Image (cartoon, rainbow, N blue to C red):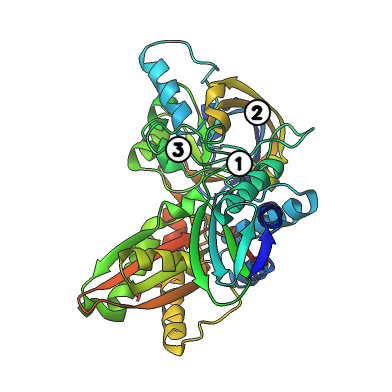
Amino acid sequence: MATYTLTTPLTSEDTKKLVAGDTVLLNGTIYTARDAAHKKLVDLIEAGEELPFDLEGSIIYFVGPTPPKPGDPIGSAGPTTSYRMDTYSPTMLKNGSKGMIGKGNRNQAVKDACVEYDGIYFGATGGAGALLGKQIRSAEVIAYPELGPEAVRKITVENFPVTVVNDTKGNDLYQMGREQYEVKS
Amino acid sequence: MREIEFDVVVKAVKDMIMHCGTDLPQDTYDALETAMENEKSPVSKEVIRQILENANIAKDEKRPLCQDTGLAVFFVNVGEEVRINGGLLRDAINKGTAQGYEEGYLRASTCEPFSRANLKDTVGYNLPAIIHFDIVAGDKIDIEYAAKGGGSENVSRARVFPPAAGKDGIVAYVKEVISDAGGNPCPPITVGVGIGGTFEKACISSKHALFRNLETKNPDPEMAELEERMLTEINNLGIGAMGMGGTKTALAVHIESNPCHIASLPVSVNVQCHSSRHTHITI
């Protein structure tokens, strides 16, 4: 299991070297979106309309942060459960996005899309919102402010710690890890 | 009849909420530390290390432990010889909840079930709180509080078994629920199991079981043994911290058991994430 430091936007060259279980420290711009925002983004893609940000090489973070305290760019910001985005993620990957950050299992369609479009599903530590929020240097709502915590934010991260869960070869860390430690009765 | 001022309850509830949002209870912290020491998977060990580091940052800098600051859930035991002066007890708890969440920079997460409209500007900031009242002897009010996140609530389930299912059936069911949940509820989890009663009694008991201090043993030896058996079975699943694979999927299993109908054996499994934010006060 290797450790990499990567800066967005990511290329296929970046993602193809990553293997399930690797640790990655992410730097640069990433975008936040939960289910409500994903629905709006995918509707725009399907209608052939322009998106509020460039998908090419982008990483989408599934998060709905707490309100920032005065002077902070953002509040606590850990990942939300990813399966709610399973319907939308293949379309995002097909249209240029290279990665997602969340927690919990993805369905087969998302894993297949990671293989087909050189995408990575990264896991961040759920419930570590204070720690992860501190790695976010700036945050700006760029779309759907009416969604409150679920609005799309453009955020800048520094050494944001994530683990590769689903890689471009079809590996799944959750499945591999569980098989290794399961005690059969 | 003892009288307690409305504002005293408001302030007490607000303080509990703000404290719980940033300070992980000691029993949870200690249980996680023990889990980290005993975890065999290096990946899961690192995840638990991050969880503990997160707790230290949150406490020192007064930042919310998790962005999901939960729905506010209360179990309130009201003494028969006490009354609130200046308003209703339910209103005082709701007012304290709204103030605590807003002033603590905690997230307002209540919404309409279908439109998904956030209720912060209509009903109130993170309102309404979920409150379970009971009437007890005495002149005090005992308020237990927990911040209940959505990820772990989403994997919780209940079922009414035929009595023949017995202990083996219940253990298999609990194992199935946790196995299907995988990493989604943010393990290492605490598992609340409500057994017996009626359908809704089992559910409420499984919730209340999560409020129990993690360092305590079930006073009923039969239930204590059943808790141990369930804990072993769950940890044998290999799910590990955040589902990354490991030997510590659950910190504890807590059972609350009730008498039930001769025809039924209700069971409810309520899951709590590793950020088990719970506390209680007596006024």
Image spot of residue A54 (x, y percent)? 54, 17
Secondary structure under tag 2 reads strand
Instruction: Please tell me whether residue B198 is drawn above or below residue A38 in the rendered image.
Output: below
Distance, label 1 to label 3, CA atoms, is 35 Å
* Amino acid tagged 3: Thr
- In the displayed structure, would residue B122 be above or below residue B189? above
- Please tell me which residue lies in front, A106 or B60: B60
Residue A141, quarter of the rendered image: top right
As helix, strand or loop, the secondary structure at mark 1 comes to loop
> Could you say which disc has been placed on residue A155 in the image?
2
Which quarter of the image is occupied by the C terminus of chain A? bottom left
Question: Circle 2: is it few (<14), some (14-19), or many (20+) Cα within 10 Å?
Answer: many
Viewer-side label of 1, 2:
1
Q: Earlier in the sequence, mark 2 or mark 3?
A: 2
Q: Residue at x 47, y 84 (%)?
A: B224
Q: Nearer the viewer, residue A79 or B195?
A: B195
State the CA–CA distance, disc 2 to disc 3. 25 Å
State which quadrant residue B84 falls in: bottom right
| Tag in front: 1 or 3 | 1
Given residues B249 and A175, the one toward you in this image is B249
Task: Report the residue marked by disc 3.
Answer: A168
Q: Which residue lies under the disc numbered 1?
A: B107
Q: Chain of mark 3?
A: A
Q: Chain of mark 2?
A: A
Please give the chain letter of the residue carrying mark 1.
Answer: B
Q: Position of residue B34 (x, y in %)?
A: 64, 72
Dot 1 surroundings within 10 Å: few (below 14), some, or many (20 or more)?
many
The answer, for residue B85, to whether it is visible in the render is yes
Tell me whether the residue at label 2 lies in contact with that at label 3, contact meaning CB atoms closer than 8 angstroms. Answer: no
Q: Neighbour class for label 3 at 10 Å: few (<14), some, many (≥20)? A: many
